[in-house]
Image (cartoon, coloured by chain):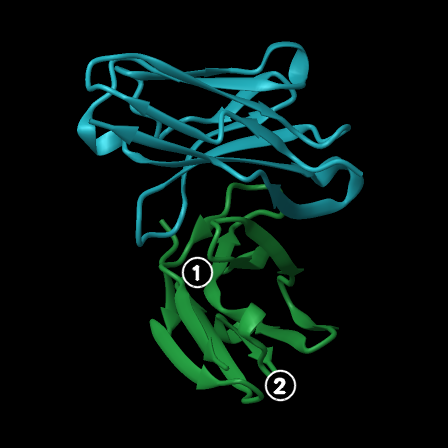
Amino acid sequence: EAGVAQSPRYKIIEKRQSVAFWCNPISGHATLYWYQQILGQGPKLLIQFQNNGVVDDSQLPKDRFSAERLKGVDSTLKIQPAKLEDSAVYLCASSSPGQGNYGYTFGSGTRLTVV
Amino acid sequence: GIQVEQSPPDLILQEGANSTLRCNFSDSVNNLQWFHQNPWGQLINLFYIPSGTKQNGRLSATTVATERYSLLYISSSQTTDSGVYFCAVGRGRDDKIIFGKGTRLHILP
């Protein structure tokens, strides 16, 4: 099966600019997650979707971050305006708990540098 | 929230050696996963193991849920095993998982 697809792989922007990341999960996976990984740390959950509904966005900085998952398939994560501390790798993952598959599959991530 | 502690933080071994990585967690969990993050940043799921023992080639894992810890064993290490190993846990089977800080493993040729 195809893996989790993410784009772009790298992005460099200036602070106060906006940026968007895209994720296409494994076909049939109802649950999609966005994680932020700052250099030297473990990934931190930003938002969890079940189909096209939000399950958990308690750690999403909603003043500048937004995410959507239209039609319950692919998803976009947006930052507007970006700050220097947003420099990180943004990882998308999917799972299929409804099919008994609780293990997460991660995409390759998008490395964001804010200058 | 649940606290996840991994040890050791860093480990340097010669090729061919065996290693044991530990993950302690502060509360009952029904979801525990081990990941390997390779030097290019890709996170690979090694095991979904909320309890019991599993083996996959040179890797095996054991989770003792009642004592709130999990162990990852790597036997006959190869240089390709280098990277960071993360343990991640969740309260429910389909809850979000929380990552530890990882164990950085470096295998010398």
**Residue shown at 39% from the left, 58% from the top:** B100
Q: Is residue B56 above or below residue B99?
A: below
Q: Is residue B90 above or below residue A27?
A: below
The residue nearer to you, when weighing A28 against A6, is A6
Is residue A16 visible in this depiction of the protein?
A: yes
Real-space CA distance between mark 1 and mark 2, rounded to the nearest whole angstrom: 33 Å
The quarter of the picture where the N terminus of chain A appears is top right
Counting every numbered tag in the picture gives 2
Crowding near pointer 2: few (<14 within 10 Å), some, many (20+)? few
**Residue shown at 69% from the left, 28% from the top:** A30
**Direction from residue A2 to residue A110 in the image, left or right:** left
The residue nearer to you, when weighing A53 against B92, is A53
- Residues behind callouts 1 and 2 on a single chain: yes
- Chain A: its colour in the image is cyan
Is there a contact, CB below 8 Å, between mark 1 and mark 2?
Answer: no
- Chain B: its colour in the image is green
Amino acid on which the number 2 mark rests in the picture = Ser
Crowding near pointer 1: few (<14 within 10 Å), some, many (20+)? some
Q: Chain of mark 2?
A: B
Judging by the rendered image, the residue that carries numbered circle 2 is: B76
Which image quarter: residue A71?
A: top right
**Residue shown at 32% from the left, 25% from the top:** A12
Is residue B65 visible in this depiction of the protein?
A: no
Q: Which mark is residue B27?
A: 1
Q: Secondary structure at mark 1?
A: loop
